[in-house]
Image: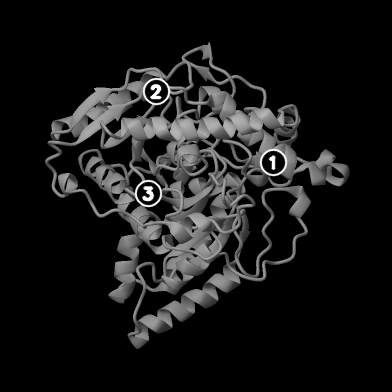
Amino acid sequence: MSDTDLLFTPAAKAAALIRAKKLSPVEYLDTILKAADEANPRLNCFRAVMAADARRDAKKAEEAVMRGDPLGPLHGVPISVKDLVDVKGVPTRHGSAIFEGNPPAAADDILVKRLRDAGAIIFAKATTPEFGNKGLTDGPSFGVTRNPWNLGRTPGGSSGGGAAAVAAGLGPLSLGTDGAGSVRGPASCSGLVGLKPTLGVVPYDTTRDAFGNNIYAGPISRTITDAAIMHSVMAGPSEKDPWALSSAGQRPLSPKLSGEDLSGVRIGYVERCANPRVAADVRSNTLAVLGGWEAMGAEIEEVTETIDWIEYEGRVLYQAGFAVSCAQYLPKWQNQMDPVTLAFMQRGDRFTLADFRNAQFARTALFRRIQTLFERYDFIVTPTNARTALDVTHDAANDDVIIDGVKCGITRQGWTSYQYPFNLTGHPAMAVPSGFGADGLPTSVQIVGKWQAETDVLRLGALLERIRPWAELRPEKFLTA
């Protein structure tokens, strides 16, 4: 196997080769570290590469294989972690100059610990915009993260560093977080799989508002199987997350999805949420995906009734959150903060308590509306983004998103509006590749399932992967540049 082929080997296959003593964890890691040394100056996808610690762990992983120890499902697999999540011994900078001098984290986040317990090798911290604030990955403290499919485009945000890394073959998996689409959007921009779980299925111990939480952690991968394995490793209760503590866990696979005959499966197709347009190439690829499932027996129906996707109320919750949580930093750090953070704070500061409470009530109403849709449908399917990846120079606070020559509002209105509603309702949602746009960049569809139906969502994605495979597609121009 060539080094390039090894870089693009799925995590499940690499772990199987390691268990069979056909792949050395040390040599595997060294191949990824060498590629990261070459690629990171162009991509800027890593804030830190923990080469020495990772090599130590890879050596221990190899020794465990040779001893015949019990091995976890990700044994010897290198994984990067978003810079909002603590990794012991490495500063968590939150993408911000404010925390550039942070001391090393004293302990692993619970999800990092679970990944290590499954045998994973944590080798890098991936870039994120300040506090995960937007759908692009850039910031004054670290610069611009670029998309390996086209270095002039963004890999999305806020888990853009991890998505760029996986797309470029720098580790088969990355741990992302998703507060308003931040796993699914980067997966969409980068030709990858990105899973946001049901609220409570995977714990999120570090959120400041545990009871009103809408932030999730999920895998970014090239294959459905890899996403499923990583998700299963991270799922489970936590004493520090009330949603995870009380979660009923995941539902078993629906019998209707046990084979490849989808007769009896009903899919509701939503062409637009709060966005005024969807690009013609995105729409065409989405319809082709739906046609693939329909050919397998699924019943496809467009959802035509008017739904209030609470774009305004969602904005209240999002921007008011920044206004309150970041106010403490303004006296000392205002001149070094991301202008997008400051713009969101200024807008959020104008909302009243009544605005905020009414937005919370609207969140409940949206949840109940989606629950009503799931009385008719097994899945809801939408595009993931309304168009392909934006230019890296795009100003997320002020610039209009242009779709087929038409201005469509800022990113949350014109580009990513399919994503945030399901952060608010808590339903599992997964981005999967749907093809390529006219500009040669990836497009994506979003599969939304019933609460705790991650297994069904993954299965529907796996059936699509079988008939429209994507994992072997690579950003060749970047690799050969």
Left or right: residue 41 compared with residue 112 = right
Spot occupied by residue 307 in the image (x, y as percentages of width and height): 42, 22
Task: Indicate whether 297 appears above or below 122.
Answer: above
Could you tell which of marks 1 and 3 lies nearer the N-terminus?
1
Spot occupied by residue 416 in the image (x, y as percentages of width and height): 50, 30
- Element class at badge 1: strand
The crowding category of the residue bearing disc 1, from other C-alpha atoms within 10 Å (few below 14, some 14 to 19, many at least 20), is many
Badge nearest the viewer, 3 or 2:
3
- Element class at badge 2: loop
> Which residue is pictured at 67% across the width and 51% down the height?
94
In 3D space, how far apart are the residues under numbered discs 1 and 3 (Cα atoms)? 26 Å
The crowding category of the residue bearing disc 3, from other C-alpha atoms within 10 Å (few below 14, some 14 to 19, many at least 20), is many
Quadrant in which the N terminus is drawn: bottom left
Left or right: residue 289 compared with residue 392 = left
Q: Amino acid at mark 2?
A: Ala
Badge nearest the viewer, 2 or 1:
1
- Element class at badge 3: loop
Label number found at residue 355:
none
> Which residue is pictured at 42% across the width and 49% down the height?
197
Q: Which residue is mark 1?
A: 139
Question: Which corner quadrant of the image does residue 8 belong to?
Answer: bottom left
Q: Amino acid at mark 1?
A: Gly
Task: Indicate whether 8 appears above or below 479.
Answer: below
Spot occupied by residue 133 in the image (x, y as percentages of width and height): 64, 39
Q: Which residue is mark 2?
A: 438
Q: In front: 28, or 316?
A: 316
Label number found at residue 222:
3
> Which residue is pictured at 54% across the width and 47% down the height?
215
The crowding category of the residue bearing disc 2, from other C-alpha atoms within 10 Å (few below 14, some 14 to 19, many at least 20), is few
